[in-house]
Amino acid sequence: MNRMSARYHTCMDWMDDDNWYVIDKKHDRFILTDKAPEHARESFELYKKVNDFDWNDSPVHIE
């Protein structure tokens, strides 16, 4: 795996579990849930950085 592809996979690790994120249809973006572990939160931050997204939503609670 080359360097770029490794970075891509790391920045998408937050999508490994459907309980870790929700889709905010109003703003057309993803939001992490409070069930996302630390490595998923770090991955999500990398995803936002790679894609030049500047939002900073608080995690949402799901049952």
Image (spheres, rainbow, N blue to C red):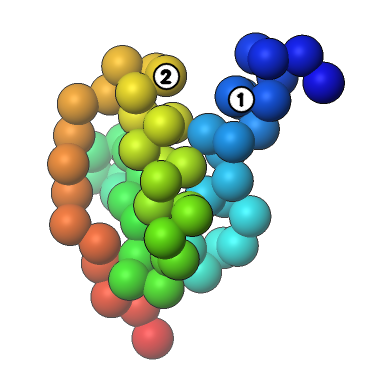
Circle 1/circle 2 CB separation < 8 Å: yes
In the rendered image, residue 12, in percent from the top left (x then y), is placed at: 57, 38
Q: Residue at x 65, y 13 (%)?
A: 4
Is residue 21 something that shows in the picture?
A: no
- The relative height of residue 8 versus residue 10 in the rendered view (above or below) is above
- The relative height of residue 9 versus residue 40 in the rendered view (above or below) is above
Crowding at dot 2, Cα within 10 Å, few <14 / some 14-19 / many 20+, comes out as: few
Helix, strand or loop status at disc 1: helix
Crowding at dot 1, Cα within 10 Å, few <14 / some 14-19 / many 20+, comes out as: some
In the rendered image, residue 27, in percent from the top left (x then y), is placed at: 23, 38
Quarter of the figure with the C terminus? bottom left
Q: Looking at numbered disc 2 in the image, what kind of residue is underneath it? A: Val
Q: Nearer the viewer, residue 41 or 58?
A: 41
Is residue 8 something that shows in the picture?
A: yes
In the rendered image, residue 21, in percent from the top left (x then y), is placed at: 43, 58
To which residue does mark 2 refer? 50
- The relative height of residue 53 versus residue 14 in the rendered view (above or below) is above
Q: Residue at x 61, y 25 (%)?
A: 8
Q: Residue at x 41, y 32 (%)?
A: 46
Q: Residue at x 28, y 75 (%)?
A: 61
Mark positioned earlier in the residue sequence (1 or 2): 1
- Residue furthest to the bottom: 63
Helix, strand or loop status at disc 2: helix
Q: Looking at numbered disc 1 in the image, what kind of residue is underneath it? A: Tyr
Quarter of the figure with the N terminus? top right
- The relative height of residue 33 versus residue 5 in the rendered view (above or below) is below
To which residue does mark 1 refer? 8
